[in-house]
Amino acid sequence: QFHMIKYEDLKWDESLGQGSFTRIYRGHKTDIRDGENYTTEVLLKELDAGHKNCWESFFESASLMSQISHKHLLLVYGVSVHGVQNIMVQEFVKYGALDLYLKRGRSVSVSWKLDVAKQLASALNFLEEKHIVHGNICAKNLLLAREGDQSQGISPFIKLSDPGIMVLDRIPWVAPEVLDAPDDLTLECDKWSFGATVWEIFNNGNSPLQGWDLDEKRQFYESFQKLPPSQWAELADLITQCMDYQAALRPSCRSIIRQLNSLITSGNDVRYTELQIIP
Ligand SMILES: Nc1cnc(-c2cc(N)nc3[nH]ccc23)cn1
Protein backbone atom coordinates (compact mmCIF):
# COMPACT_ATOMS: atom_id res chain seq x y z
CA GLN A 1 0.00 0.00 0.00
CA PHE A 2 2.71 2.47 0.80
CA HIS A 3 6.44 2.82 1.01
CA MET A 4 8.10 1.46 4.16
CA ILE A 5 10.81 3.77 5.48
CA LYS A 6 13.70 2.49 7.60
CA TYR A 7 13.66 3.98 11.12
CA GLU A 8 17.41 4.62 10.94
CA ASP A 9 16.84 6.84 7.91
CA LEU A 10 14.79 9.23 10.05
CA LYS A 11 16.01 12.03 12.30
CA TRP A 12 13.73 13.83 14.79
CA ASP A 13 14.02 17.59 15.23
CA GLU A 14 11.68 19.67 17.36
CA SER A 15 8.25 18.65 18.59
CA LEU A 16 5.39 20.50 16.91
CA GLY A 17 2.69 19.53 19.36
CA GLN A 18 0.31 16.65 19.58
CA GLY A 19 -3.09 15.62 18.31
CA SER A 20 -5.59 13.40 20.06
CA PHE A 21 -3.73 10.13 19.31
CA THR A 22 -0.59 11.42 17.69
CA ARG A 23 2.56 13.39 18.39
CA ILE A 24 4.06 15.42 15.56
CA TYR A 25 7.66 16.49 14.98
CA ARG A 26 9.65 18.27 12.34
CA GLY A 27 12.38 15.94 11.10
CA HIS A 28 14.48 14.73 8.20
CA LYS A 29 14.70 11.56 6.17
CA THR A 30 17.80 10.48 4.30
CA ASP A 31 17.71 8.73 0.95
CA ILE A 32 20.55 7.35 -1.05
CA ARG A 33 20.10 7.87 -4.78
CA ASP A 34 22.88 7.11 -7.25
CA GLY A 35 25.26 6.83 -4.32
CA GLU A 36 24.42 10.34 -3.12
CA ASN A 37 22.99 11.08 0.31
CA TYR A 38 19.87 13.28 0.21
CA THR A 39 18.08 14.64 3.26
CA THR A 40 14.52 15.86 2.99
CA GLU A 41 12.69 17.87 5.63
CA VAL A 42 9.64 15.91 6.73
CA LEU A 43 6.81 15.90 9.23
CA LEU A 44 6.89 12.87 11.51
CA LYS A 45 3.50 11.82 12.87
CA GLU A 46 3.85 9.25 15.66
CA LEU A 47 0.78 7.22 16.50
CA ASP A 48 0.47 6.58 20.24
CA ALA A 49 1.32 2.93 20.89
CA GLY A 50 -1.65 2.84 23.24
CA HIS A 51 -4.12 3.60 20.50
CA LYS A 52 -3.70 0.40 18.52
CA ASN A 53 -7.38 0.53 17.69
CA CYS A 54 -6.86 3.68 15.60
CA TRP A 55 -4.10 1.89 13.75
CA GLU A 56 -6.17 0.93 10.72
CA SER A 57 -7.74 4.37 10.28
CA PHE A 58 -4.27 5.91 10.72
CA PHE A 59 -2.83 3.76 7.93
CA GLU A 60 -6.00 3.86 5.89
CA SER A 61 -5.80 7.65 5.70
CA ALA A 62 -2.08 7.42 4.92
CA SER A 63 -2.57 4.89 2.17
CA LEU A 64 -5.47 6.90 0.74
CA MET A 65 -3.20 9.92 0.31
CA SER A 66 -0.24 7.94 -0.97
CA GLN A 67 -2.25 6.23 -3.74
CA ILE A 68 -2.79 9.49 -5.60
CA SER A 69 -0.77 12.61 -6.18
CA HIS A 70 -1.99 16.12 -6.87
CA LYS A 71 -0.37 19.48 -6.33
CA HIS A 72 -2.90 20.40 -3.62
CA LEU A 73 -2.78 17.05 -1.82
CA LEU A 74 -0.21 16.49 0.90
CA LEU A 75 2.53 14.04 -0.12
CA VAL A 76 2.91 11.07 2.22
CA TYR A 77 6.41 9.56 1.79
CA GLY A 78 5.50 6.40 3.67
CA VAL A 79 5.42 4.84 7.10
CA SER A 80 8.04 3.53 9.46
CA VAL A 81 7.40 0.89 12.12
CA HIS A 82 9.78 0.73 15.05
CA GLY A 83 8.79 -1.81 17.66
CA VAL A 84 5.32 -0.82 18.80
CA GLN A 85 5.70 2.63 17.32
CA ASN A 86 4.10 3.64 14.01
CA ILE A 87 5.32 6.77 12.27
CA MET A 88 3.81 8.42 9.23
CA VAL A 89 6.33 10.42 7.19
CA GLN A 90 4.78 13.38 5.37
CA GLU A 91 6.16 16.22 3.33
CA PHE A 92 6.87 19.22 5.56
CA VAL A 93 4.60 22.14 4.69
CA LYS A 94 6.30 25.33 5.82
CA TYR A 95 3.52 27.44 7.35
CA GLY A 96 1.44 24.67 8.93
CA ALA A 97 -2.28 24.53 9.51
CA LEU A 98 -4.38 27.26 7.90
CA ASP A 99 -6.75 27.76 10.87
CA LEU A 100 -3.84 28.63 13.16
CA TYR A 101 -2.29 30.83 10.47
CA LEU A 102 -5.52 32.81 10.10
CA LYS A 103 -6.11 32.96 13.87
CA ARG A 104 -2.66 34.44 14.33
CA GLY A 105 -4.27 37.54 12.92
CA ARG A 106 -2.60 37.53 9.53
CA SER A 107 -4.85 40.03 7.79
CA VAL A 108 -5.28 38.46 4.39
CA SER A 109 -7.32 39.88 1.55
CA VAL A 110 -10.61 38.56 0.19
CA SER A 111 -8.84 37.50 -3.01
CA TRP A 112 -6.29 35.59 -0.90
CA LYS A 113 -9.14 33.70 0.78
CA LEU A 114 -10.84 33.09 -2.55
CA ASP A 115 -7.60 31.66 -4.02
CA VAL A 116 -7.45 29.19 -1.10
CA ALA A 117 -11.10 28.21 -1.57
CA LYS A 118 -10.50 27.61 -5.30
CA GLN A 119 -7.45 25.44 -4.59
CA LEU A 120 -9.43 23.37 -2.09
CA ALA A 121 -12.23 23.02 -4.65
CA SER A 122 -9.77 21.76 -7.26
CA ALA A 123 -8.36 19.21 -4.80
CA LEU A 124 -11.91 18.05 -4.04
CA ASN A 125 -12.71 17.88 -7.74
CA PHE A 126 -9.67 15.65 -8.26
CA LEU A 127 -10.76 13.36 -5.40
CA GLU A 128 -14.33 13.30 -6.75
CA GLU A 129 -13.07 12.22 -10.18
CA LYS A 130 -11.21 9.38 -8.44
CA HIS A 131 -14.31 8.58 -6.34
CA ILE A 132 -12.22 9.07 -3.22
CA VAL A 133 -13.91 10.49 -0.11
CA HIS A 134 -11.59 12.51 2.12
CA GLY A 135 -13.93 12.61 5.11
CA ASN A 136 -12.26 15.33 7.13
CA ILE A 137 -12.17 18.56 5.17
CA CYS A 138 -11.59 21.49 7.54
CA ALA A 139 -9.22 24.45 7.85
CA LYS A 140 -7.12 22.52 10.38
CA ASN A 141 -6.41 19.99 7.61
CA LEU A 142 -5.36 22.64 5.11
CA LEU A 143 -1.62 23.32 5.21
CA LEU A 144 -0.10 26.54 3.90
CA ALA A 145 2.92 25.92 1.69
CA ARG A 146 3.28 29.49 0.43
CA GLU A 147 2.03 32.69 2.08
CA GLY A 148 1.66 34.53 -1.22
CA ASP A 149 2.44 38.18 -1.73
CA GLN A 150 -0.38 40.41 -2.90
CA SER A 151 1.97 43.18 -4.01
CA GLN A 152 3.91 40.74 -6.23
CA GLY A 153 0.74 39.04 -7.42
CA ILE A 154 1.86 35.76 -5.85
CA SER A 155 -1.07 33.70 -4.57
CA PRO A 156 -1.00 31.50 -1.46
CA PHE A 157 -0.62 27.72 -1.96
CA ILE A 158 -2.36 25.09 0.18
CA LYS A 159 -2.12 21.32 0.57
CA LEU A 160 -4.99 19.20 1.83
CA SER A 161 -3.69 16.97 4.61
CA ASP A 162 -4.60 13.35 5.28
CA PRO A 163 -8.02 12.85 6.90
CA GLY A 164 -6.30 11.77 10.10
CA ILE A 165 -8.38 10.02 12.68
CA MET A 166 -12.02 11.07 12.62
CA VAL A 167 -13.18 12.29 16.00
CA LEU A 168 -16.89 12.46 16.48
CA ASP A 169 -17.42 16.04 17.57
CA ARG A 170 -16.90 17.15 14.07
CA ILE A 171 -20.10 19.21 14.01
CA PRO A 172 -20.47 21.35 11.86
CA TRP A 173 -17.80 19.93 9.51
CA VAL A 174 -19.33 16.45 9.42
CA ALA A 175 -22.43 16.18 7.23
CA PRO A 176 -25.65 15.57 9.20
CA GLU A 177 -26.36 12.23 7.48
CA VAL A 178 -22.98 10.94 8.71
CA LEU A 179 -23.93 11.34 12.36
CA ASP A 180 -26.48 8.55 12.06
CA ALA A 181 -24.37 6.41 9.74
CA PRO A 182 -20.69 7.16 10.29
CA ASP A 183 -19.63 4.29 8.06
CA ASP A 184 -21.00 5.33 4.71
CA LEU A 185 -19.12 8.52 3.99
CA THR A 186 -19.96 9.77 0.52
CA LEU A 187 -18.55 12.37 -1.83
CA GLU A 188 -21.49 14.59 -0.82
CA CYS A 189 -20.18 14.62 2.75
CA ASP A 190 -17.02 16.32 1.51
CA LYS A 191 -19.16 19.04 -0.10
CA TRP A 192 -20.84 19.81 3.22
CA SER A 193 -17.41 20.01 4.89
CA PHE A 194 -16.17 22.20 2.03
CA GLY A 195 -18.94 24.69 2.87
CA ALA A 196 -18.01 24.74 6.56
CA THR A 197 -14.32 25.15 5.64
CA VAL A 198 -14.97 28.10 3.29
CA TRP A 199 -16.96 29.65 6.16
CA GLU A 200 -13.90 29.22 8.42
CA ILE A 201 -11.56 30.75 5.84
CA PHE A 202 -13.78 33.84 5.55
CA ASN A 203 -14.08 34.04 9.34
CA ASN A 204 -10.35 34.30 9.98
CA GLY A 205 -9.99 30.68 11.04
CA ASN A 206 -12.65 30.85 13.73
CA SER A 207 -14.52 27.58 14.09
CA PRO A 208 -18.22 27.76 13.30
CA LEU A 209 -20.34 27.19 16.45
CA GLN A 210 -17.21 27.91 18.51
CA GLY A 211 -17.82 27.22 22.18
CA TRP A 212 -21.07 25.36 21.61
CA ASP A 213 -21.37 22.11 23.57
CA LEU A 214 -22.26 18.81 21.92
CA ASP A 215 -25.97 19.10 22.77
CA GLU A 216 -26.25 22.60 21.31
CA LYS A 217 -24.40 21.34 18.22
CA ARG A 218 -26.73 18.36 17.83
CA GLN A 219 -29.66 20.74 18.22
CA PHE A 220 -28.17 22.84 15.41
CA TYR A 221 -28.54 19.85 13.07
CA GLU A 222 -31.85 18.67 14.43
CA SER A 223 -33.43 22.06 13.78
CA PHE A 224 -31.78 22.32 10.33
CA GLN A 225 -29.99 25.51 11.29
CA LYS A 226 -27.51 27.21 8.99
CA LEU A 227 -24.25 28.96 9.79
CA PRO A 228 -24.51 32.77 9.97
CA PRO A 229 -24.42 34.00 6.37
CA SER A 230 -21.43 35.95 5.12
CA GLN A 231 -22.25 39.53 4.23
CA TRP A 232 -21.06 38.61 0.76
CA ALA A 233 -24.36 37.26 -0.54
CA GLU A 234 -22.95 35.19 -3.42
CA LEU A 235 -20.42 33.53 -1.10
CA ALA A 236 -23.09 32.91 1.54
CA ASP A 237 -25.26 31.36 -1.16
CA LEU A 238 -22.50 28.95 -2.25
CA ILE A 239 -21.85 27.93 1.36
CA THR A 240 -25.58 27.33 1.85
CA GLN A 241 -25.76 25.20 -1.31
CA CYS A 242 -22.84 23.05 -0.08
CA MET A 243 -24.37 22.73 3.38
CA ASP A 244 -27.73 21.56 2.12
CA TYR A 245 -29.31 19.08 4.54
CA GLN A 246 -30.30 17.03 1.48
CA ALA A 247 -27.02 15.55 0.30
CA ALA A 248 -28.26 14.99 -3.25
CA LEU A 249 -28.93 18.71 -3.69
CA ARG A 250 -25.36 19.77 -2.91
CA PRO A 251 -23.58 21.14 -6.00
CA SER A 252 -21.04 19.16 -8.03
CA CYS A 253 -17.38 20.17 -7.73
CA ARG A 254 -17.56 21.59 -11.24
CA SER A 255 -20.46 23.80 -10.22
CA ILE A 256 -18.59 24.87 -7.07
CA ILE A 257 -15.54 25.82 -9.16
CA ARG A 258 -17.72 27.69 -11.68
CA GLN A 259 -19.42 29.67 -8.91
CA LEU A 260 -16.11 30.47 -7.20
CA ASN A 261 -14.71 31.71 -10.51
CA SER A 262 -17.74 33.94 -11.01
CA LEU A 263 -17.36 35.64 -7.62
CA ILE A 264 -16.14 39.15 -8.23
CA THR A 265 -13.59 40.19 -5.63
CA SER A 266 -13.21 43.77 -6.83
CA GLY A 267 -14.89 46.08 -4.35
CA ASN A 268 -15.10 43.17 -1.94
CA ASP A 269 -11.46 43.50 -1.13
CA VAL A 270 -12.33 45.16 2.13
CA ARG A 271 -11.81 43.43 5.43
CA TYR A 272 -14.99 42.79 7.29
CA THR A 273 -15.74 40.72 10.34
CA GLU A 274 -18.51 38.21 9.98
CA LEU A 275 -21.51 37.69 12.20
CA GLN A 276 -21.14 35.19 15.02
CA ILE A 277 -24.26 33.55 16.41
CA ILE A 278 -24.28 33.35 20.21
CA PRO A 279 -25.85 30.06 21.40
N1 LIG B 1 2.60 18.10 6.88
C1 LIG B 1 2.84 19.11 7.78
C2 LIG B 1 2.00 19.34 8.87
N2 LIG B 1 2.26 20.34 9.73
C3 LIG B 1 3.34 21.13 9.54
C4 LIG B 1 3.64 22.23 10.48
C5 LIG B 1 4.37 23.32 10.04
C6 LIG B 1 4.65 24.36 10.92
N3 LIG B 1 5.39 25.46 10.50
N4 LIG B 1 4.26 24.36 12.19
C7 LIG B 1 3.55 23.31 12.63
N5 LIG B 1 3.04 23.10 13.86
C8 LIG B 1 2.37 21.90 13.83
C9 LIG B 1 2.47 21.33 12.58
C10 LIG B 1 3.22 22.23 11.81
C11 LIG B 1 4.17 20.90 8.46
N6 LIG B 1 3.91 19.91 7.59
Image: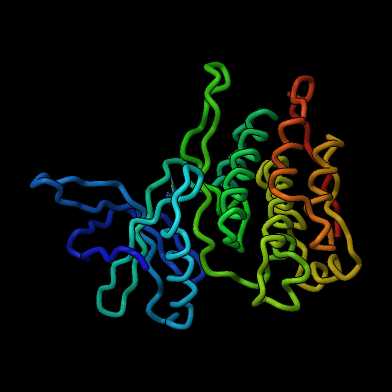
Q: Is residue 130 left or right of residue 247?
A: left
* Residue 214 % position (x, y): 76, 71
Residue 45 image-quadrant placement: bottom left
* Residue 149 % position (x, y): 53, 23
Residue 33's place in the image compared with 87, above or below, is: above
* Residue 166 % position (x, y): 58, 69
Which colour scheme appears in the figure?
rainbow
Near-viewer residue (90 or 272): 90
Residue 239's place in the image compared with 20, above or below, is: above
Q: Residue at x 18, y 45 (%)?
A: 38
Q: Residue at x 83, y 53 (%)?
A: 227
Q: Residue at x 76, y 37 (%)?
A: 259
Q: Is residue 40 visible?
A: yes
Q: Given the current orientation, which residue lies at the most extreme top position?
A: 151
Q: Residue at x 63, y 54 (%)?
A: 138
Residue 111's place in the image compared with 21, above or below, is: above
Near-viewer residue (7 or 240): 240
